[in-house]
Image (cartoon, rainbow, N blue to C red):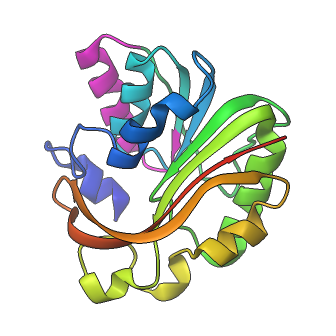
Amino acid sequence: MWEERYGADEYAYGKTANDFLQQMVSKLPVGGKVLCLAEGEGRNSVFLAEQGFLVTGVDSSQAGIAKVNRLAKERGVEVEAIVADLAEFDIGQGKWDAVVSVFCHLPPPLRKQVHERVVAGLKPGGVLLLEAYTPDQLKYKTGGPPVAEMTMTLAALENEFQGLVFDTAEEKVREVVEGLYHTGTAAVVQVIAHKP
């Protein structure tokens, strides 16, 4: 599915970074090393590189990563773009100043593993920025996974990110306008958390 979606010429989710990331970028450690999970076509990682961060973007789609590189070149910035399955990607220990997860929807057992690895991978003082769809999103049908188990709730995230302090944590309904596949009223959860 992702190779086909990202293989088209147009950017499926647009070239503009996620709204929540743009609003909250000042919460990330200035100039730090940032890991973007399920980076897709690069809109978020390229935006962060433009703000002076050292960015690594990971996605399982070769077509997506090719578009990350294309967008970075177009904007005159560098992003380390890696094709990898998050089930196997080594996030490392105490390596990242920030981890960005924007609509990174995984099956629950894998999501729990990845989120635990994110906690381990953040440096002390490191920041997690996450936005995801909640189960209520199934009513809106404006993007995201077609099944509730692939969505996220604040309660589940608090459980999966044990060891982080939640600074911003909210489930809300907002307008999301991101390319062809995320457009309209949406039910989301937004989190900013830090590692003490």
Residue in the foreground of this view, choosing between 142 and 29: 29
Q: Residue 48, percent across and down?
A: 44, 26
Kindly report the secondary structure that dominates the magenta region of the rendered protein.
helix
Q: Which residue is found at the position 25% from the left and 38% from the top?
A: 16
Image label count: 0
Q: Nearer the viewer, residue 19 or 181?
A: 19
Q: Please provide percent x and percent y for residue 187.
A: 37, 74
Residue lying at 23% horizontally and 18% vertically, measured from the top left: 74
Q: Residue at x 14, y 44 (%)?
A: 10
Residue drawn at x 33%, y 37% is 43
Q: Residue 115, relative to residue 64: is it above or below?
A: below
Q: On the image, which quarter does residue 159 sit in?
A: bottom right
Residue 156 is drawn in which quadrant?
bottom right
Q: Inspect this view and state whether residue 42 appears.
A: no
Q: Is residue 123 left or right of residue 157?
A: right
Region of the chain picked out in magenta, as a range: 58-77
**Relative to 170, residue 149 above or below:** below
Check the image and report above or below for 125 versus 21.
above
Please, which residue is most extreme toward the front here? 167
Does the image show residue 173?
A: yes
Q: Is residue 59 magenta?
A: yes
